[in-house]
Amino acid sequence: MARVKFSVRGREVYKTTIRVRVDDVNYGGHLGNDSVLTLCHEARIRFLNEIGHSETNLYGKGIIMTDAMVLYKAEGNLGDKLEIALYIDDVGRYGFDLYYALSSQGKEIARVKTGIAFFDYNQRKITACPEEFSQKYG
């Protein structure tokens, strides 16, 4: 069986800590796969808020997720304090990659990569990367 393999790449831009809640735990008694993406979404929102932006206004443009990969390394459990570090890489004409490194007490829990495109929500189409973003993170 082929497995997804990737390393976290890019420049670290943000770190946050989020505790695993009861809603994040599945029937197996550990962090659920759907919750991993939700926790990454929360970390992304916190990062954007920290720099004075949002998903609908990042240097004047919206953003939309185009793909996601998750690589599970260990179980996360109820009450764990997850440290989530965000990294930006591969800034291009229309978007960038955002990597997330999830760990708890020094143990790697998961790696996540999301493709992010700049998006015009009024015209409902992908749009060019703002120059300010490219200069700062490119």
Image: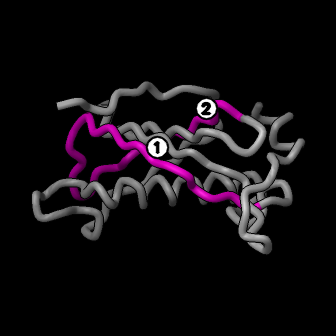
In the rendered image, residue 20, in percent from the top left (x then y), is placed at 32, 58
- The kind of secondary structure element at disc 1 is strand
The rendered magenta stretch, by its main secondary structure, is classed as: strand
Queried whether the magenta region covers residue 19, the answer comes back as no
Looking at this view, name the residue that lies furthest to the right: 131
The amino acid sitting under disc 1 is Ile
Q: Which residues are magenta?
A: 62-91
Look at 80% across and 59% down and name the residue there.
61
Label 1 environment density (alpha carbons within 10 Å; few <14, some 14–19, many ≥20) = many
User: Height in image: 104 above or below 80?
Assistant: above
Give the residue number, with chain letter if any, for mark 2.
Answer: 12
Left or right: residue 73 compared with residue 38: left
Give the residue number, with chain letter if any, for mark 1.
Answer: 84
Label 2 environment density (alpha carbons within 10 Å; few <14, some 14–19, many ≥20) = some
Left or right: residue 14 compared with residue 130: left
What quarter of the picture does the N terminus occupy?
top left
What quarter of the picture does the C terminus occupy?
top right
N-terminal of the pair, mark 1 or mark 2, is 2
Look at 21% across and 52% down and name the residue there.
77
Q: CA distance from mark 1 to mark 2?
A: 11 Å
In the rendered image, residue 98, in percent from the top left (x then y), is placed at 57, 41
Q: Residue 134's quadrant in the figure?
A: top right
